[in-house]
Amino acid sequence: MRSWARSSGLRLGLFWVSALLWAGSSHAAVGDDTERLEAHVDPRGGVRATAHVVFPAPSHVIQAILTDYAEWPALFETKMRVASLSIDQGVATIDLRISHGLLPGERRLVSESKALANGGLVTDLKEGDFKRYHRVWMLTATDNGSRTRADFEMIVEIETLLPDWLVAIAIRQELAAHFRIVKEKALRRATPGT
């Protein structure tokens, strides 16, 4: 019995070490155009992330990328797929299935998204394997409209036994990669002849 308990404890310890190494090293760092990216444990549970990012394209290009719901999985390094998508009166209901290295199996995230009149997007949890999910993008044109400043906020709480501090580390790394991918797509769309 003791050897089983010792073996289980060792496996659990190796899992946490592996998880920390994965979360800290597998994604790109925040780029120069990201003025700030923070992710920390929210006192109410889960993780709160905020960022200010400058994208190298006009705000209508960023808006088009963010509202291309069927292509959302291509904006992340984390493996995910769109199980279903419907749009009714400007509200998009997206059923995402997310496979993450820190979590076994797929997690279901059903959310509702709508574009904001002044530029941006708000997404809220409808159902799934999350306790809370709220994400807001606020877009502002800068540099005579050639670039876009985005103010980003996200609150996420997943149905999991993982500690929130570990989820915060992973989310920060994933958001850094997400912003990089959106920048690359924006640059390609905004550059003539590409």
Image (cartoon, grey):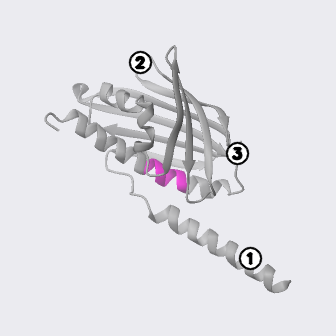
Amino acid type shown at disc 1: Gly
Is 138 magenta? The answer is no
Circle 1 Cα neighbour tier, 10 Å, few/some/many (<14 / 14–19 / ≥20): few
Q: Nearer the viewer, residue 162 or 99?
A: 99
Q: Nearer the viewer, residue 175 or 9?
A: 9
Residue 118: mark in rendering: 2
Residue 138, percent from left and from top = 44, 28
- In the rendered image, the quadrant that contains the N terminus is bottom right
Circle 2 Cα neighbour tier, 10 Å, few/some/many (<14 / 14–19 / ≥20): few
Q: Residue 2's image quarter? A: bottom right
Identify the secondary structure beneath mark 3.
Answer: loop
Q: Please give the range of residues in magenta.
A: 170-176
Is residue 127 left or right of 138 when viewed as pictured? right
Q: Residue 169's image quarter? A: bottom right
- In the rendered image, the quadrant that contains the C terminus is top left
Sooner in the amino-acid sequence: mark 3 or mark 1: 1
Residue 45: mark in rendering: 3
Q: Residue at x 46, y 41 (%)?
A: 51
Q: Kindly indicate whether the residue at mark 3 contacts the one at mark 2 (C-beta within 8 angstroms).
A: no
How far apart are the alpha carbons under marks 2 and 3? Answer: 31 Å
Amino acid type shown at disc 3: Gly
Provide the residue designation for mark 1: 9
How far apart are the alpha carbons under marks 3 and 1? Answer: 26 Å
Residue 89, percent from left and from top = 51, 13
Is residue 130 left or right of 61 when viewed as pictured? right
Residue 152, percent from left and from top = 47, 36
Residue 11, percent from left and from top = 68, 76
